[in-house]
Amino acid sequence: MSTILKAYDTFLESDSISGETVECSIDQLYFRKPSDYPDKSQRWLIEDPDGFWAASYARKRAAATEETNESGKETRK
Amino acid sequence: MADVNLERGEELSKELGDSVLFHQTDVSEWDQQAALFKRTWEWSGRIDLFAANAGIDDRESVFQRFDDEEPKKPNLKTLEVDLVAVFYGLKLFVHYVRKNEKPGGKMVITASCVGLYPFETNPTYCAAKHGVCDSHPIVL
């Protein structure tokens, strides 16, 4: 429990720690990183350097919002 | 402080005094968690830290009871409390901390070491905990 609380204190006292996964064991805090990519293809897929996922989901979400607004208008008629 | 256990919550709240407010909540119910945040906001006017700590282990074994005629729907409450409810809390947290005098705040999710490794005695707990590891950097 004291190690968990040490983790909380670390987060509370820091202005820069964000989006971290911390593993507590015995009295230690281990900041864990996600798995390594096995190859360049997986790295490209996840890191999205060409904005492929970002653009696709922006379009998809814009279409969904438009659909909701349209059906809202229909209902209000 | 929020928990499903009203009796223990009120006992502990009395022990800890006026600086603590206890509100009975089943975090897996959106309406209840939303009511918790609303009450907290009304009571304190600010949210600095949200500790998304509530969690339960597997309610039943995925491997038990294969002798039924028709398969029964499994009890996946563990996923609702340990994973779905964390996303409810995240949405509520962002909604309110944007209204802080100085916008922003901290959210700490209690995961588990079994969020990083396989764990055969509690597969749905393991799945939920994997779900809250590495998924949060997307937001903050």
Image (cartoon, rainbow, N blue to C red):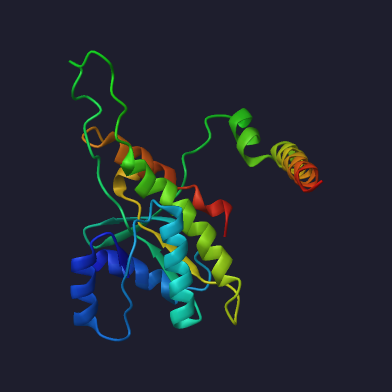
The residue drawn where x is 28% and y is 61% is A28
**Residue under the point 19% across and 67% down:** B7
Please say whether residue B48 is visible from this viewpoint.
Answer: no
From the viewer's side, name the closer residue of B52 and A46.
Answer: B52
User: Viewed as shown, does residue A75 lie left or right of B36?
Assistant: right
Residue at the far bottom in the pictured view: B18
- Residue drawn at (20%, 16%) of the image: B68
The percent coordinates of residue B109 (x first, y second) are 40, 58
Find the residue positioned furthest to the front: A77
How far from the left and from the top, in percent, is residue A52? 73, 36
Q: Is residue A16 visible?
A: yes
Q: Is residue A55 left or right of residue B19?
A: right
- The image quadrant that residue B124 belongs to is top left
Up the image or down, A63 lies above or below B30; here it is above
Q: Nearer the viewer, residue B117 or B57?
A: B57
- Residue A19 vs residue A60: left or right? left
Q: Residue furthest top?
A: B69
Name the residue located 24 percent from the left edge and 32 percent from the top edge. B120
Q: In which quarter of the image is the C terminus of chain B?
A: bottom right
Percent x, y of residue A4 = 28, 64
Q: How many marks?
A: 0
Of B137 and B13, the residue lying toward us? B13
Residue B123 in the image: state x and y as whole percent: 29, 34
Relative to A70, is B109 on the left or the right? Answer: left
Closest to the observer, B14 or B52: B14
Question: Image height check: is B110 above or below B58?
Answer: below
Which image quarter holds the N terminus of chain B? Answer: bottom left
